[in-house]
Image (cartoon, coloured by chain):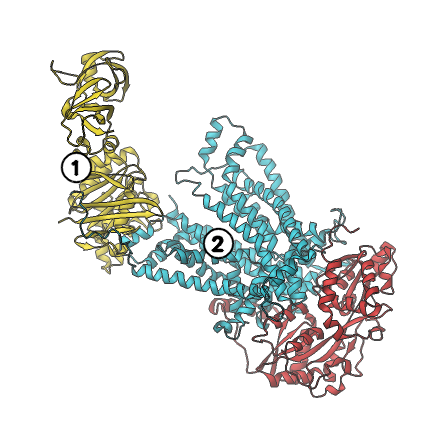
Chain colours: A red, B yellow, C cyan
Amino acid sequence: MTNSSFMRRAAMAGLAAVATVGFGLPAMAQKTKLTVYTALENDQLDPFKKAFEVDNKDIEIAWVRDSTGVVTAKLIAEKGNPRADVIWGLAASSIALFSTMNMLDPYTPAGADKIKPMFKSGKSPETWVGMDAYLSLICFNTAEGKKGNKSAPASWADLIKPEYKDSIVMPNPASSGTGYLTVAAWLQIMGEQAGWKYMDALHQNIAQYIHSGSAPCVQAAKGERLIGVGLDMRGASEKSKGAPVDLIVPKEGLGWELEATAIIKGTKNLAAAKKLADWAVTKKANELYAKTYAVVAYDGVVALPKNYPANAEKAMIKNDMEWMAKNRERILAEWTKRYDGKSAPKK
Amino acid sequence: MSYLRVSNLTKRYGSFAALGDISLEIGEGEFVCFLGPSGCGKTTLLRAIAGLDPQTSGTIHQKGQDVSALPPAKRDFGIVFQSYALFPNLNVADNVGYGLVSRRLARRDVTKRVEELLALVGLPDAGPKYPAQLSGGQQQRVALARALATSPGLLLLDEPLSALDARVRLRLRHEIKALQRRLGVTTVMVTHDQEEALTMADRIVVMNHGAIEQVGTPQQIYRAPATAFVADFVGSMNFLSGRLAAPDRVTVAGLSFACPVQDGLAAGEDVRLCIRPEDVRVRDLPADASNRLPIEVAELDFVGSFCRASLRARAAPAIELTADFSSNLMRDLGVTAGSQLDVALPPDRLRVFAA
Amino acid sequence: MTVAAAPPHATRLRATRVGLSLDDLVMRLGVVALAVVLLVIVGLPLWSLLAKGFEDRDGQFVGLANFVAYFSTPALFDSALNSIAVALVATLIVVPLAFIYAYALTRAVLPLRWLFQGISLIPVFAPSLLPGIALIYLFGNQGFFKGVLGGPIYGFDGIAIAQVFYCFPHATLILVTALATADARLYEAAEVLGASRLRTFFTVTLPGAKYGLISAALVVFTLVITDFGIPKVIGGNFNVLATDVYKQVIGQQNFSMGAVVGLVLLAPAALAFVVDRLVQRKQVALLTARAVPLIPRPQLGRDALLTGFCTLVAFGILAILGTAIWGSLIKYWPYNLSLTLDNYDFAKFDANGWDSYFNSLQMAVGAAVVGTALMFVGAWLNEKTRGFHVMRGVVQFLAFLPMAVPGLVLGLGYIFFFNAPNNPLNFLYATMAILVVNTVAHFYTVGHLTATTALKQIDPEFESVSASLKVPVWRTFARVTTPICLPAVLDIAIYLFVNAMTTVSSVIFLYAPDTKLASVAAVNIEEAGTTAAAAALCIVIVITSAAVKALHVLADRFLLGRLQAWRRR
């Protein structure tokens, strides 16, 4: 921000605060303002908005961005009187939930045929269409590993080695979608019984269950923890900033989640919303997604982000979304019973 | 016709009766004091008259108009509180003119009236000062000027002098009384100070436990207290426990005293015989003086202009009296502690109350 | 004049109903309006969330089933115990610290007293994120003092330390007020009676500050119980009620269970509140008009000791602030410690960039203006209206409610209430106005209390005098009451401004695309892992609030000094 624009903003804010105490600034232009709820990363918002608006000059995107949980809670709470026009970049599991609550306006975007089948809702018309997949993998801090003379893990099974005692962080599935998909992946890979046994053992090595899916890899990147289990892209971007962190794809396979686009039922800007949905499945859009995500929806667009492990897409497990949704409450209750609230000295 | 008539006024706080069936009338231009110990209901009565704490039941008529249900703003009165309640952020002139400004008077008229009032209370130069810069006595006068500014028909004073030094209080007593006389404004003052009431009031209403004990001029109240409470509360009083032997005789500890004829009491009843210390006679006792009593001076307390003497009857040590002996008398008769002499209790000065 | 005999038509049985003057009528209407406003901004939103505690996830009424489920889940019940434990410990640490600090400020001759007083306020200006971040820099696994605590900072220790920092100014403010109003005559009496200093302390000082101590303890306890920013950042696996609400609502979109936890969370806070009310009721004008103010005399040993203590505490506060500042200037902690200003270019970390900061300013000014007016006029109406006890009681209750309500609960309630399609107020939703309203509601209690206290301190007879002079009440309100209470009015405005700058938990659900606030942006940025930028944004908030506070002090000293010449003798 230049200095003069800073001053102008300051003056404007001051004036507005005095004059229109309480009321937001009126919209500047005649453009259709499309309210888009999202959980995309902060730094993605601006490029996405700009790219879309270049192709749709009459539409202006207004982001409401927060973590997946907050956005999901907000959308459900607003169910009676929706405020969002479109969702662009929110976990498909959340969107599937909205679908069961009859909150979406089904629409198959023009060009959706170019999208890989697993990135679509499978309904006709589609209730949602995917953009990208994010994965839950292992972030390992090499600097701390060297310092502590600890080897890098190569598999989920490695994580229960005693050398990692109290040095792993993972998201708390009760507060983080990433946490849940990670746990669900283990249960699907190993089967329920073995899965719980694995987590029992892993529990001994967990330093903390964090209330965020992106924080574990960040903590690992900053050496706050040796190992973080969590969102992939954040780990990659931290590494690009110079963090001594390696992204490891465990050989058993990866749990993953889609981010998707959907139109909210009752939007007053349906035409503009459809334009966004159309644009979101274009090749151009997917190339944009590919800058941060390893796996995107458009068939054939592949451009690994910087510092991203090459073998990730192949390691994605066969994820049964329906099973995940159906068993969510039961699994979380079981998980909470076993591991949550056991902050007291561990045996 | 009375200016203010209070009829059957009661005030309850839950089950506690702060005022029980009060009725009284006040004439135009009168200065009336409500006198009594704290908690007797005198302030409650004043606030009911002002409408600040409305009564539970009963009526109040002012100048013939029923004001019982009117809010304070619709009644005609000026009020001065113990705390003065001067507006600290307004100077004296603005305080005094406070009620005038909202009457749409011309600014010049307001200024003139304020000057007049300040002159009236003897503070002609205090206008631009703030209350905090004034002494307590000066603040009190400003409060008075403010209350009088709108020429109210009724002036209510709630313990106006009790926060002041003794000397200032004495002076203000006279000033307020003089002012009241000059303006002829009907005034009700609440006080717990009997001396204040006696010196200032045309009439005194003595109250106790939410009820009126006696209404009368200061002389009546002092000379002829209607109840033992009034006798005790106003001035000093000796109380001797005895029995009414005949309508005009009381026996105390075996000694018989003549007293005014008692109509309301039956012979044989337990009574209290009362006499004020200054009414105990020492000098020039006629030989046949009634109620002559040989005593011994047990103690002498020097009070300044006189001595308060504790006396004990020689024939009946149970009889103890206090009497006021002037310095002259002490010198003339050579009274000291332990002196033995005769005193008389003049029958016309004796009061008898049922025990 | 005679004692009038009861006239035959005496109406002794009929109770008098005093008529209402125009003033009375207007004021009563005002009280009703205030009650309605409070109901709309506090009562109904709260109810629309808490009612969900009795519904299942599909909105069917299920009675107490959710509560049964809650209390039979041991992990959730443990959180309640954890909350109480950490609140107790924080209270037991903060209150004595704050007491000694306040004692030094009021009863000792302290060099640079104003500086110590100013430093003690710093935590108020900071979002609760700040101590969390600073503690990770200091005691985290890569921190300067890692291992000093003998265990990980994440968890009980971290929450307790951060809460001590966060609550310290609140306790200190209350105790400074309690200790400042001392009657020197009591100390002279003690001295004359030959009481030792220690005995004087225990027989005069402590009893005098008793109510302040209780009040401070309850405020700290409530703050810790309801705060969720600190346990979220540094709580580790140590679950507390506030994070449980978060897990239920944000993690699982389970509003029913969130409401249940919210209600449970209300309980200790409400209990603390009731105790406070009972205690405060007993405190009637400890200080009479005749009291002689105590002016501390120099006393070398005591002063040196207390100066040392205050320096230590001040150093602790500055260390936490300093760490955050330093952290905000670091390129990539802990691997690249070179300094940079890049972290202050917020556009890099958040789509709204600096806009969110200006939104915050606008919101804070709005909350300060609207809130102060509402709280002061409201407190005045409620104090000065004659009679009308039931309605005034309702207002009093609604005014006290927000203190016990966690922001998260209030914020969600706002969505459910204000966004309901049949709510005529739903035009407010997603505007700056609703953020202002929400903030005013969230911080209503303290403002209301401040105004009420100030109003109670002025002569209760002003209104009586005005009535007798036939001056309308509003005129006395404007010409006398408000000017006298101006310092308290400014205090309320500053309090609202500062809290509006830092509040997160309630507004996080309510901002719209163009009304995102800096405090929320800081949380978002922190969540995304750019701790340095989050620290930078916190620092910008601290500097802003501190600057506004400094302006307030200057205004108090010079401007008010001139306007309020009448205070001088």
| Residue B128 horizontal/vertical position (percent) | 30, 49
Q: CA distance from mark 2 to mark 1?
A: 55 Å
Instruction: Look at label 1 and name its amino acid.
Output: Thr
In the rendering, which numbered label is found on residue C491?
2
Which structural element holds mark 1? Answer: loop
Horizontal side of A235 relative to B332 (left or right) equals right
Q: Residue at x 19, y 49 (%)?
A: B5
Instruction: Look at label 2 and name its amino acid.
Output: Asp
* Quarter holding residue B39: top left
In this view, the residue in front, C110 or C293, is: C293
User: Are marks 2 and 1 in one subunit?
Assistant: no
| Residue A176 horizontal/vertical position (percent) | 71, 65
Which structural element holds mark 2? Answer: helix
| Pointer 1 chain | B
* Quarter holding residue A108: bottom right
Q: Residue at x 62, y 66 (%)?
A: C255
Q: Residue at x 39, y 55 (%)?
A: C389
Q: Where does label 1 land, which residue?
A: B217
